[in-house]
Image: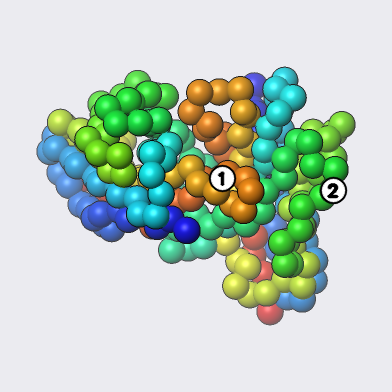
Amino acid sequence: AQKITQTQPGMFVQEKEAVTLDCTYDTSDPSYGLFWYKQPSSGEMIFLIYQGSYDQQNATEGRYSLNFQKARKSANLVISASQLGDSAMYFCAMREYNNAGNMLTFGGGTRLMVKP
Amino acid sequence: SQTIHQWPATLVQPVGSPLSLECTVEGTSNPNLYWYRQAAGRGLQLLFYSVGIGQISSEVPQNLSASRPQDRQFILSSKKLLLSDSGFYLCASLGAAGALETQYFGPGTRLLVL
């Protein structure tokens, strides 16, 4: 079974509007972390935001916020006021703390395209 | 903050040739290190990880191998490349994100096997 699922292979958003990128996860580990990365066309993976499973509040980082719904096992990324530079691939990832290597499991990604 | 270097940035190699990709990390000590491969338009596949010098764990059986000769050096190798080895190879290090930890990535190496 997929541990991280991103159901939107591609999305369009108008510049200056907000957009939500979906991510659902599956784990039986009570302690885990959820991450979002941005990958522009250059290929580098840029860490955006993190949410811990025990965090009471949704994480925010500038224009990025994470809509964490633990019971639904979802961790959607919200980008407010989209900019042309936000066009990129976005990956959701999970780290279960009950593993030796602290590995991340990545979803398949969502390609976001911002229209001017 | 830590910095991850990878080289070469781009590599074109014939089938059957050997491979050596290098990753070095600055600004941290005794990091967990990771090698990922990304096929075009796809997600990341974890290949190897290392929690210390000489300690390598393989996630996917294949003709690739990894070594960690020094604390902050991680090498991905192959004796004979296959066409299917083409892809974008990313090295990552576990590091702090404030009070938390996340994986930070190097700039990657694009490998094309012809």
Mark pair 2, 1: CA separation: 19 Å
Amino acid found under the numbered disc labelled 1: Thr
Quadrant holding the C terminus of chain B: top left
Look at the picture and state if B59 lies above or below B9: above
Q: Which residue is mark 1?
A: B102
Pinpoint the chain carrying mark 2.
Answer: A
Q: Which mark is residue A57?
A: 2
The residue nearer to you, when weighing A32 against A74, is A32
Q: Position of residue A57 (x, y in %)?
A: 84, 48
Whether tag 2 and tag 1 are in contact, CB under 8 A, the answer is: no
Q: Is residue A106 left or right of residue B46?
A: right
The residue nearer to you, when weighing B100 against B34, is B100
The residue nearer to you, when weighing B73 against A86, is B73
Q: Please give the name of the residue rendered at 67% of the width and 69% of the height, measured from the top-left corner.
A: A114
Residue B57 visible in the displayed image = yes
Q: Is residue A73 left or right of residue A43?
A: right
Q: Position of residue B57 (x, y in %)?
A: 37, 24
- Mark 1 neighbour density, 10 Å: few (under 14) some (14–19) many (20 or more): many
Residue B39 visible in the displayed image = no
Q: Position of residue B53 (x, y in %)?
A: 29, 31
Q: Please give the name of the residue rendered at 62% of the width and 53% of the height, measured from the top-left corner.
A: B98
